[in-house]
Structure formats: C-alpha cells, structure tokens
C-alpha cells in the first residue's frame, strides 16, 4: 500500500501520537485527519476502506496538527470545537474545554427547569466558561430564561461566540459575587462548575496542566474558595425552594455538604457520575 493512502497516513499519525503518550492515539489521529479533510469520522473510516488518498496540502496540515497534539495541546483546541450534550461549542486557548462528566451534572438543572411550574423559569450558570451549561439549559428548556456569568477576559469571548444567537440567554462579563443582583430571589436553578482544584494539587495530564486556564482550575488552598462564594450568591439568587447544583472533585462532597448546611441550605446531597465518583452536590434554598 503506498504511503499516501489515508490508511497509511492515519497509521503513521497514530504512531507519532502514541509515542508522545497521547491516551487514545488512533481516535485522535482519525479525528484530526477527518478535521483536515472537512469530513466526519465515519466518512473518513469509509474513505480508508475504499483505499482513498490525501492531497499534499492536507497532508502538511495534518502533519502540523499531529506535531501540536504531540506536545499535548488538547484535541479540541486543534479542531476548534468540543461536543456538549446535543451541541458543538467553539473552544480554543483561554477557555476551559467542557468535559463529558459535566453533561450529567447539567441534567440536574435541566430537569429542575423542566419540572418547574412557573411559565418562564430562570436558570443561572455561574462560571460559564465556553457557555456549555447555559447553552444546554437555554436550548433544552426553550421556555426558560437563562443567565450566564464569566469573569475571565480570555474565556468571555468564547462564551459570547457560543451564546450570541440564543435569544433566551443573557451573558454577563463579571464576577459571580457581584453580578445579576437585578434577578435576586427569582431564579429556580443556580448551577456552577467552578474552579475547584486545591492550589497545590497540580493536575497530572499535560492537556489540563498546560492548556486549561489557571482561573478555570484552581480554587484556593482547599479548592473551595469559589464554592463558598457560590453558596452566598446562590442563597441570594434563588427563590425559596430553588435548586443549587455544584460540580466538584471526587473528594470534596462531604466538605461541600457541611459548608452548605452551615450556610443554611436544605437537603445537601452528593451525587456520583457514571464512573461512580462523587461529582456534584445539590441543595435547596430554604
Ligand atoms: C471549570 S471552568 C467551567 C467552565 C464551564 N462551566 C464548563 O463546565 O465547561 C470554571 C470557569 O469559572 C470562571 N470563573 C472563575 N472564577 C470566577 C468568578 N469569580 N466569577 C465568574 N466566573 C469565574 C473561570 O474563568 C472558568 O471559565
């Protein structure tokens, strides 16, 4: 088989990625090749079976992307998109790449909005990053009114890009501690995936350590600085009976339940993700 066939090109890309320690080298090689070819992964696999080749320009473009992935730049920065629930979000340097586990955390907020008896329930996503959770709430519960807050100057433009065409979503650039006071006492749901990594617990994966923004990761000595601010702000934003949803690290459930109970929240409960790790805590506004 000549070296210019797609099959050989994908194989060689996967070998380079494997040598660099990329966790799923064949998947990434196929996704990068499909991205360069402007086709889906399924179409690429069909083209490989047919014995198709690749043009010289595309081969060079792929070579450059494989070099960047080999220094562990996140795949999503290279393709420019990340899937989240039923949407594709624009992502790149400066914004946290949304994770699959957050998709299940977002479900708590979506279910609460769907089950809310009011005609136009309000959902708030504090620490919105790319806008992932806010976009999911606004598009999956179209009768809801959704607000999203992001502090980082680097992340905000990505959220702007992902939310600008969604009519029932209002994006605010600022600190969760002092924004949205105009809707205090009216929200049915406040959700957040805040920075929660303790300052000294530097993540092992290079994709996270080197490319996720520090403001998205670190939450002070115990990782809970932003959670404490969320508890205060959540009590102000929610209507009585409204739901708070916080994503967190697998070892933080108990500390967060205690913190919320001390602040007066009702029924703090921690929930596991699909890998059976504590992943989120919910509580009700008294
Ligand atoms: C872990 S990322 C989560 C992004 C997104 N919600 C997601 O799940 O993909 C946390 C985000 O919170 C933002 N952030 C940190 N402190 C904040 C604050 N005080 N007010 C608003 N946003 C903040 C960071 O810039 C970052 O975009």
Image (cartoon, rainbow, N blue to C red):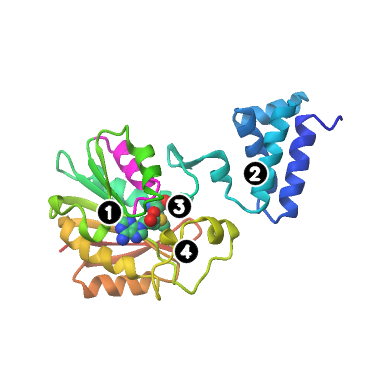
Q: Earlier in the sequence, mark 3 or mark 1?
A: 3
Q: Earlier in the sequence, mark 3 or mark 2?
A: 2
The answer to which image quadrant residue 168 occupies is top left
Is the CB of the residue bearing disc 2 within 8 angstroms of ligand 1?
A: no
Residues shaded magenta = 127-142
Residue wearing tag 3: 96
Q: CA distance from mark 2 to mark 1?
A: 35 Å
Q: Is residue 108 left or right of residue 45?
A: left
Residue wearing tag 1: 174
Q: Which part of the image, by quadrant, shows the C terminus?
A: bottom left
Residue wearing tag 4: 277
Residue 35 position in % (x across, y down): 61, 33
Q: Earlier in the sequence, mark 3 or mark 4?
A: 3
Is the CB of the residue bearing disc 1 within 8 angstroms of ligand 1?
A: yes
Residue 230 position in % (x across, y down): 27, 63
What secondary structure is found at the residue carrying circle 1? loop
Marks 3 & 1, CB-CB < 8 Å contact = no
> Of discs 3 and 1, which sits in the foreground?
1
Q: Earlier in the sequence, mark 4 or mark 1?
A: 1
Residue 102 position in % (x across, y down): 42, 52
Q: Would residue 23 be counted in the magenta stretch?
A: no
Marks 2 & 1, CB-CB < 8 Å contact = no
């Amino acid at each position: 088989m000549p070296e210019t066939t797609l099959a050989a090109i994908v194989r060689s890309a996967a070998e380079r990625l494997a040598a660099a320690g990329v966790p799923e080298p064949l998947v990434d090689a196929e996704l990068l090749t499909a991205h360069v070819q402007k086709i889906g992964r399924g179409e690429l696999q069909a083209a490989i079976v047919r014995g198709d080749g690749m043009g010289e320009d595309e081969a060079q473009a792929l070579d450059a992307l494989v070099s960047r992935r080999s220094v562990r730049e996140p795949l999503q920065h290279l393709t420019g998109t990340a899937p989240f629930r039923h949407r594709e979000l624009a992502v790149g340097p400066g914004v946290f790449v949304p994770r699959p586990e957050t998709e299940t955390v977002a479900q708590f907020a979506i279910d609460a909005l769907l089950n809310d008896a009011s005609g136009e329930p309000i959902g708030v996503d504090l620490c919105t990053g790319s806008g992932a959770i806010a976009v999911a709430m606004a598009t999956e519960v179209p009768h809801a009114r959704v607000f999203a807050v992001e502090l980082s100057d680097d992340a905000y433009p990505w959220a702007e890009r992902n939310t600008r065409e969604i009519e029932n979503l209002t994006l605010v650039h600022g600190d969760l501690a002092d924004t949205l006071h105009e809707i205090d006492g009216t929200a049915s749901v406040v959700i957040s995936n805040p920075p929660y990594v303790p300052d000294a617990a530097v993540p092992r994966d290079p994709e996270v350590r080197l490319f996720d923004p520090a403001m998205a990761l670190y939450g002070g000595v115990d990782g809970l600085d932003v959670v404490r601010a969320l508890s205060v702000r959540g009590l102000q934003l929610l209507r009585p009976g409204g739901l708070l949803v916080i994503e967190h690290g697998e070892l933080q459930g108990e500390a967060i339940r205690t913190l919320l109970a001390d602040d007066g929240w009702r029924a703090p409960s921690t929930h596991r993700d699909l890998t059976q790790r504590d992943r989120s805590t919910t509580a009700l506004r008294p």
